[in-house]
Image: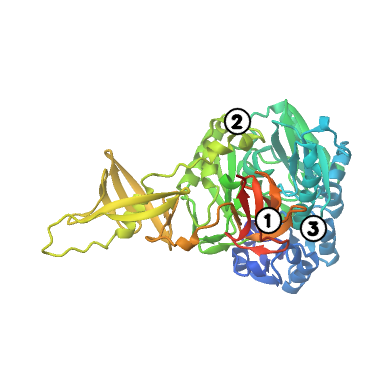
Amino acid sequence: MIASVLVANRGEIACRVFRTCRASGIRTVAVYSDADENALHARVADVAVRLPGAAPAETYLRGDLIVKAALAAGADAVHPGYGFLSENAGFARAVRDAGLVWIGPPPEAIEAMASKTRAKKLMGLEPLTEVTPPDLPVLVKAAAGGGGRGMRVVRDLAQLDAELAAARAEALSAFGDGEVFVEPYVEGGRHVEVQVLADTHGTVWALGTRDCSLQRRHQKVIEESPAPGVDADLTAELHELAIRAARAVGYTGAGTVEFLVADGRAHFLEMNTRLQVEHPVTEAVFGIDLVAQQIRVAEGAALESDPPRARGHAVEARLYAEDPSRDWAPQTGTLHRLALPRKADVRLDTGYTDGDPVGVHYDPMLAKAVAHAPTRAEAVRRLADALERAEIHGPVTNRDLLVRSLRHPEFTAARMDTGFYDRHLAELTAPAPDPYAPLAAALADAHGRSRFGGWRNLPSQPQTRRYLMAGDEHEARYHHTRDGLTAEGVRVMHADAGLVVLEISGVQRKFRVSRYGDQVHVNATALTELPRFPDPAARQEPGSLLAPMPGTVVRVAEGLAEGARVEAGQPLLWLEAMKMEHKISAPTSGTLGALHATPGQQVEVGTLLAVVQRAL
C-alpha cells in the first residue's frame, strides 16, 4: 500500500492530487521552485522540498532532483500530474529504478505514445515530410508534451520555416524536447477525446467522450462530457479505437485518446499518457475519483469488469490570467480574491488563494470551474452564472470571455468547432463595461467623508472621481447633501465602502465594491482610479512598442536594426512569458527609430522595446 506520494508538479494539479491523498490517508510531499516558495501547493503539503531556481528547466523538468527529493522526504510513490515530466519515459524509469512506485503507465507505453510521431505510426499514420502548396493549411506540432505549446497553423508556405523554429523553441522550453512534425490541418473539425483507465489485469475502461473544441492557441478553454451531437455509433467507434490504442501499448492507469471529428469521421490525433486538465468533467459524470483510481491501479488493484454508469452532463471552464482582447497576453500581479458562489454541483480546482502572486514563469491558468447537472443546458447555465457572480480581483482574466462563450448561441446549440474563437473572438471580447460602475466606485469611496457646518445652507459643489474602465476614461459626479450622497439621474438607496445600492429608472441595483490601492472592482467590472493631476512625464513617444507583459526577449527578427524599414504587422521580436512565445509586431509602417530589446533581456510590463516612426 502506498503511504506517501510526492507530486512532481505544481499549482492546481498538485493541490488536486493532494486532496485525494488526504482523503485516502496518504502523506503528501511537494516540490517547489524559488518562484513557488510560498505557493499554495507547497503550503498545503505535509512536506515540501525546494528545487533551486525558477525556470522550468532548472526545477520541474529536473527529474534527477525530483527523485532525490522523493527519497529525502521518505515518499514511496511519485505522481507526475500533467505537463512537465508527466510523459517522460526516462523520468518514469528513474522513479522505478529508485525503488519508488510510479503512478502512471509503463515507460514503454509512454515511449510508444508520448511522441506523437511514433503514436501516429503505431496507428498506421504518417506525418508530412515535404510540404507543398496543395497541402496547406498544415499544423506544426511538438512531438512531446501538450497544452497547445509548440503548435502553429501555417497557411502560407513562406512562413513555414519561421513557424517551425518558433514551435521548436517553445517545445524545448516547455518539455525539454524540441522535436516537431507537420500534419494536415483539418478545418472545421471538433476536438473529441476518450478517457481510458486500465489496470494490470487486462481490464480497460472507456469512460465516455469529452468535447474540447473551444480552444485558444490550440489550448483548450471549455470542455464538456459527454461530447454533444456524437451519436451512439460514432461513440462506439471512438471507444473501440481508444481501447485498441491502450491495449496496443500495454497501457495501465489513466490516459486520453484524442480525435478530430469532421463529417462524421474520427481522425486520430494522439494519446496523452497522463491525467488531463479536463478530467473533472469525467469524474462528475461517472461519479468517480480518477486520481484515487490511478493510485489503486498503481497498487495493483483490479478494476470492475464494467465502468460505472454515466449520469448527466458536466462542463468545465479554464480561468486564465490573460487578456483575450490583446492576443491572449498573459497577465501578472496579485490575485487579491478568487471565490465562486457556493452552488450545488459546482467545483473549483485551483492552486491559488487570496493574496497569492501570479508570476511570469509558469502557465497562466488560475483555476478550473466545473458544473454538473442532469442536462447539458442546465450545466452550461449553472457554470455561466457561477462565473458571472464570482469574485475575481487582481490581474485581467478571461472570465468575461468564458461567460459570453457559454451563452453564445453557437455553443448553446452545440454547433461549435475548433474555429469558434477565430470566428467570434472580436464580438466575445468587445468591451461592455457597466456604465454605473464608476459612480458606484466613487460613492463607496466617498462613504463617511461628508462633513457639514451647522450654519451652511448652500448646495455643495459636485465631487468628481476619474477612472479607467475598459481602456477609456470615465468621470463620476456626486454631491454631499444633508440627506447624504446624491447623484444626478439616480437615487442613492445605500452607500458604504463595500456595497452601493442605486435606484435606476425605478429598478434597484446592487453594486459590490472592493478596493486594492487604485484598483477597484465593482461586481465583475474592473476599474483603475486615475490621479487628479496626471503626470505629464508619463507620456510616451508616438510609435513606442512597450512590453505587454513581463518576460524574456528570446529572439529579434533577423537583420533588424535601427533605421530599417518595417511594415505594419511585421514581427519584430518575440517575448517568452508563462512558457509560451508572444510575437511583438510593428504597429505601423515606417522606420525603426530605436531598438532597445536584446535576446536574453528580462523585461517588465511597460518596458520600452522599440520605436517605429510612422512613414509620412
Query: On residue 575, which mark appears?
Result: 1
Report helix, strand or loop for mark 2. Answer: loop
Please tell me whether mark 3 sits on a helix, a strand or a loop: loop
Q: Which comes before the other along the chain, label 3 or label 2?
A: 3
Instruction: Name the side, left or right, on which 267 lies relative to 10.
Output: right
* Residue at the image position 73 percent from the left and 44 percent from the top: 304
**Type of colouring:** rainbow
Labels 1, 2: front one = 1
Furthest toward the bottom, the residue is: 72
Q: Residue 176 carries which label?
A: 3
Closer to us: 393 or 454: 454
Q: Where is residue 305 in the image (x, y as percent from the top left)?
A: 75, 41
Separation of marks 3 and 1 at Cα, in angstroms:
18 Å
Q: Which mark is residue 532?
A: none
Residue type, numbered disc 1: Leu
Residue beneath disc 2:
414
Q: At which x and y percent is residue 82? A: 71, 54
Q: Which amino acid does label 3 sit on?
A: Gly
Rendered location of residue 418, percent (x, y): 67, 36
Which residue type carries mark 2? Answer: Ala
Numbered label tally: 3
> Of circles 3 and 2, which is in front?
3
Q: Is mark 1 on a helix, strand or loop?
A: strand
- Visible residue check, residue 287: no
Which of discs 3 and 1 lies nearer the camera? The answer is 1
Q: How far apart are marks 1 and 2 (CA)?
A: 36 Å
Between the residue at mark 3 and the residue at mark 2, the CA separation in whole angstroms equals: 37 Å
**Crowd class of label 3 (few under 14; some 14 to 19; many from 20; radius 10 Å):** some
Identify the image quadrant of the N terminus.
bottom right
- Neighbor class of circle 2 (other Cα within 10 Å; few <14, some 14-19, many 20+) is some
Residue 2 image position (x, y, % from top left): 73, 63
**33 left or right of 605?**
right
